[in-house]
Image: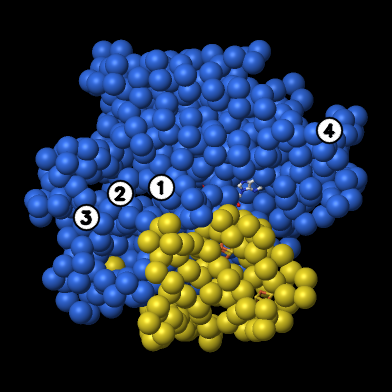
Chain colours: A blue, B yellow
Amino acid sequence: MNERLTIEAIATDFLIIGGGTAGCAAALSFCESSASGSVLIAEKAHIKRSGCLAAGVNALNAYIVPGKTPESYVDYARADAEGIVREDLLITMARGLNAAAEKLEALGLTMLKNPDGTYAARGTRNIKINGENIKPLLAAAVESQPRVTVLNHVAVIDYIVRDDRVIGAYAIDLLKPVLYVLTASATLCATGGASGLYKPNNPGFSRHKMWYPPFNTGAGYAMGIRAGAEMTTLEMRFIALRCKDTIAPTGTLAQGVGARQVNASGEIYEQKYGITTSQRVHGTVTENREGRGPCALKTVGITAEHDEQLQRAYLNMAPLQTLRWLESGETPSVRNVEIEGTEPYIVGGHTASGYWVSTERETTLKALFAAGDVAGGAPQKYVTGALAEGEIVGKAALRYTASPPPAADLAEAESLRVALEQTLRRSDANDTTDALEAEMQSVMDEYAGGISADYRFSESSLAVADEKIREIARRAEVLAAADTRELAYIFELRERLTLARSVIAHLRARRETRWHSFAENTDYPERDDANFSVFVNSRLENGELKMIFRDLVKVGETYEH
Amino acid sequence: MSIEISREKCVACGACAVVCPGTLIWVDAAAYIKTPDNCWGCASCVKECPRGAIRLYLGADAGGRGGKLSARRDGALTHWSVEKPDGKTVEITVDSRESNAY
Ligand SMILES: Cc1cc2nc3c(=O)[nH]c(=O)nc-3n(C[C@H](O)[C@H](O)[C@H](O)COP(=O)(O)OP(=O)(O)OC[C@H]3O[C@@H](n4cnc5c(N)ncnc54)[C@H](O)[C@@H]3O)c2cc1C
Ligand code: SF4
Ligand code: SF4
């Protein structure tokens, strides 16, 4: 291809990086709360079907059902995270959950209603919907806003920073050779979490048959780490318990038809290990390791009607699971659904990993906000929590958008262009992006607690992981790309490597085991409340990660920078 | 898992390439996926195709047995069809105006 890149500069009031759940919500909230001001969304895919919501979702997992309160939601999230949460972030998020659900209904999402008009609950925190078209509905709402411009198929690769303030971002177009210089008065990072750091369940041809989107590569975390933003709780990895092979969600089976976790001899083992998210994973891992597997969700014996409803429900969110049932003839009423733990992900919407933010969701870098899976401190956000955080940022950004966007330094953009063109022209690369990605995933798997290590690690294995990741990162500096899509793959690999180093540093710093499987340290197998009822945070300073231990933010307290 | 696109059915409208969350589909005389092992299996392209030209399958390494899943949209209805390895086809219609039962 043409190895020349053209520079295009665009200035906006409010730049949103990632037009996913939180990003779309922030755009809508900004427009509702202001009479003027422009919004620019830079999205690496197309907002109609990008990020976590692409395939559709099953339910709204975070909702305050009648009889419950935002405070009781906070209690649940705190207990599930064994205390390591920011209560100020959780409560401000929880207070926005129901409004977010109502907004989705107003956009046209199908919600199941009780005769009295309230939403039909599934369990104590979920409500039932048809979530197949949730992303197209959000996207259409955003596209109908005259003040919003969307750049689809544009991947952001770095922030533009002046004196500790983020004034925009650099991005590349995946469809044409263009380097964008985007400047903004306020910027939101809403790039979601990160998959692909660890070797996946199916490392061969089906390597991307994973739960978290393989295209959420941790760009937001990595850009923040590089720019010196403070990050929190990256050691609290998220491991999902999923249907074997297809890695489809299990909540519908567990909550929908009440399927319990059973081992090979049919014993229900879930009570033995506890019911927090991490304990459920740990139980399955332990049953397998001790020879009592394979483990499954007990579905045999459900009615034909349940069977058929499940096939439909999965078509609305994980259609390959329905294909799997039908092509094998082994539908859930005939055969229990085998389950396994996924590779670890970094996902601030399920656990608490991500940017260390103020209650307005501003990061430690001025004028940069974070919302959704990329923002830390507040686990159990799910769809409605990501929307609620986007809503908060859409209003908070107004503080900056009154003044015009700062000008970019075009000399810096020019040298970036030269460096990118060099990668497009290079013919002497020894490694390929794919090979280094596989190598990184093997290292993380073996030495930093991946699937094959039963999620366990030790001080010495983490030291090896750190050394090897640094070495792979050096090699990743010399890679070749034939076009801007391949250039984006190189950036994705580098993002993952940057994040992997930080994850390793966090795993090393929390010298205890508070969450089984999520952070299982074999040198420190017990929970240590005396020393570790704190946040483990980090910041990159002069090329080295500095660890920072911060006090918990308890009920009624707030943290501001 | 991945997708396969029928060159016979495809009219190169590009709709699938627009929505793929991984930007994996290319279009010349017909659409094609360059790196099938990068596919997430989300079915966005399958549902978008006006010609029913795209079929989703589960890779053998993830237990796939050769079945194929395709879809046809008709307003609020999505007609899914599963072609089983024995040649039989199962159709399931889902209405987006109806909530999941679970
Ligand atoms: C398969 C799956 C099923 C789920 N099911 C449910 C459910 O049933 N109920 C529920 O409540 N929650 C569910 N969740 C959780 C919920 O969907 C997420 O927590 C939430 O959507 C996250 O929102 P987000 O905005 O942080 O990320 P996303 O919605 O993923 O948005 C991130 C966006 O950033 C873009 N992006 C990434 N990198 C870049 C870059 N470098 N440049 C530009 N753009 C970039 C991505 O393409 C994407 O559009 C599910 C999650 C997954 C993965
Ligand atoms: S199934 Fe999803 S990831 Fe795969 S090609 Fe189609 S749209 Fe892209
Ligand atoms: S949507 Fe269907 S017809 Fe259009 S390019 Fe894709 S495969 Fe071809």
Question: Is the C terminus of chain B in the top left, top right, bottom left or bottom right quadrant?
Answer: bottom left
**Residue B78 screen position, x and y as percent:** 48, 81
Q: Which mark is residue A285?
A: none
Counting residues from the N terminus, which is met first, the one under dot 1 or under dot 4? Answer: 1
Task: Tell me whether circle 1 and circle 2 mark residues in contact (CB < 8 Å).
Answer: yes
Q: Amino acid at mark 3?
A: Ala
**Residue A10 screen position, x and y as percent:** 83, 46
Rate crowding at label 4 as few (under 14), some (14 to 19) or many (20 or more) other CA atoms within 10 Å.
few
Discs 3 and 1 carry the same chain letter: yes
Q: Vertically, is A521 above or below B50?
A: above
Distance from the alpha carbon under mark 1 to that under mark 2: 9 Å
Task: Tell me whether circle 3 and circle 1 mark residues in contact (CB < 8 Å).
Answer: no
Q: Which residue is rendered at x = 21% and y = 42% of the image?
A: A288
Asked which secondary structure carries label 3, the reply is strand
Q: Which residue is rendered at x = 47% and y = 75% of the image?
A: B69
Judging by the rendered image, the residue that carries numbered circle 3 is: A296
Judging by the rendered image, the residue that carries numbered circle 4 is: A419
Q: Vertically, is A453 above or below A136?
A: above
Judging by the rendered image, the residue that carries numbered circle 1 is: A201
Q: Amino acid at mark 4?
A: Ala
